[in-house]
């Protein structure tokens, strides 16, 4: 049945693969990850299929045929000759918990990772961070990479927000598209850097909860070409 769904949605699957490939290259070239670390996925619209990057492949060498397609329910690889990302359970856990999410990106950017090592949330100190996250970037409880516990902890800390920190690990950004997940990871890293520098200058003044809610609502419902 899954193979039939795969072929019936071949055009969508191929388009999603192209989006994942582009987001992966953007992630790498933006310095959000080093070497082969980090991972990217996207849910194929209207299906329970997820396209995800392979494990340990150089991003500059990555092509669409290397990407894996996973069934969200069985967790089995239904297309692809390469081993999928070691963090596939994390990605699948997010998709199961959030029907609004169609793109997930996991990065190891420097400033945000520093907050994750300190087990400190990144507060909403700038408007774009409030827009894409909807509050503080919460640091989840630590769990070993590649485990089901990591996925559970991430889902709990993420809630309905746009990003979460993985303790002693890095960042997960989500979005309605995989490109939005990429933009979210960029803004989280920028916000982490600004907050770290502002702490050296003085006491950062946070946005109010009302302002954060307003900024988040406007971003989700009227920002851009909606």
Image: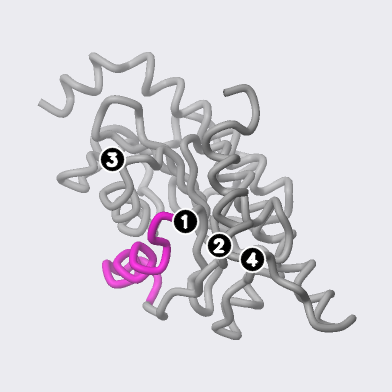
Q: Give the crowd class for mark 4: few <14, some 14-19, many >=20 residues within 10 Å.
A: few
The image quadrant where one finds the C terminus is top right
Find residue 43 and report its horizontal and vertical position in percent. Answer: 36, 36
Q: Nearer the viewer, residue 75 or 59?
A: 75
Q: Is residue 225 above or below residue 24?
A: above
> Which one is in front in this view, the residue at disc 3 or the one at disc 2?
2
- Indicate which disc residue 161 carries: 1
Tell me the CA gap for discs 1 and 3. Answer: 24 Å
Residue 126: image location, x then y, percent: 73, 59
Relative to 46, does residue 132 appear above or below in the rendering? Answer: below
Q: Tell which circle, 2 or 4, labels the residue nearer the N-terminal end.
A: 2
Q: CA distance from mark 1 to mark 4?
A: 16 Å
Q: CA distance from mark 3 to mark 2?
A: 31 Å
Residue 208, labelled with which disc?
4
Q: Nearer the viewer, residue 164 or 132?
A: 132
Label pair 3/2, CB-CB below 8 angstroms: no
The local secondary structure at tag 1 comes to loop
Report the predominant secondary structure element of the magenta stretch.
helix
Q: Residues within 10 Å of mark 2 (few under 14, many from 20)?
A: many
Answer whether labels 2 and 1 touch (C-beta < 8 Å).
Answer: yes
> As drawn, is 210 to the left or to the right of 56?
right
Assess whether residue 49 is covered by the magenta stretch: no
Q: Which of the image's four quarters has the N terminus?
A: top left
Return the x and y of residue 40 as percentages of the image width and height. Answer: 49, 46
Q: Which residues are magenta?
A: 144-160
- Name the foreground residue: 37 vs 9: 9
**Label 2 sits on residue:** 135
The residue drawn where x is 50% and y is 74% is: 139
Between residues 71 and 193, which one lies in front from this camera angle? 193
Residue at 49% x, 43% y is 175
Chain-order first, disc 3 or disc 2:
3
């Amino acid at each position: 049945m899954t193979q039939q769904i795969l072929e019936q949605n071949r055009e969508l699957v191929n388009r999603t693969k192209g989006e994942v490939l582009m987001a992966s290259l953007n992630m790498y070239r933006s310095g959000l990850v080093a070497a082969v670390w980090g991972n990217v996925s996207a849910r194929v619209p209207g299906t329970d299929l997820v396209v995800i990057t392979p494990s340990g492949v150089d991003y500059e060498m990555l092509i669409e045929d290397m990407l894996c397609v996973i069934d969200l329910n069985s967790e089995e690889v239904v297309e692809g000759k390469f081993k999928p990302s070691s963090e596939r359970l994390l990605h699948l856990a997010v998709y199961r918990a959030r029907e609004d999410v169609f793109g997930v990106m996991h990065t190891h950017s420097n400033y945000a990772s520093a907050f994750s090592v300190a087990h400190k949330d990144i507060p909403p100190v700038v408007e774009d961070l409030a827009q894409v996250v909807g509050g503080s970037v919460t640091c989840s409880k630590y769990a070993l990479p590649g485990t089901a516990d990591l996925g559970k902890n991430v889902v709990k800390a993420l809630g309905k927000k746009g990003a979460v920190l993985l303790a002693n690990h890095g960042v997960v950004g989500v979005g309605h598209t995989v490109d939005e997940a990429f933009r979210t990871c960029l803004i989280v890293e920028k916000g982490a850097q600004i907050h770290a520098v502002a702490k050296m200058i003085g006491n950062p003044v946070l946005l109010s909860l009302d302002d954060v809610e307003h900024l988040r609502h406007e971003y989700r419902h009227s920002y851009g070409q909606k």
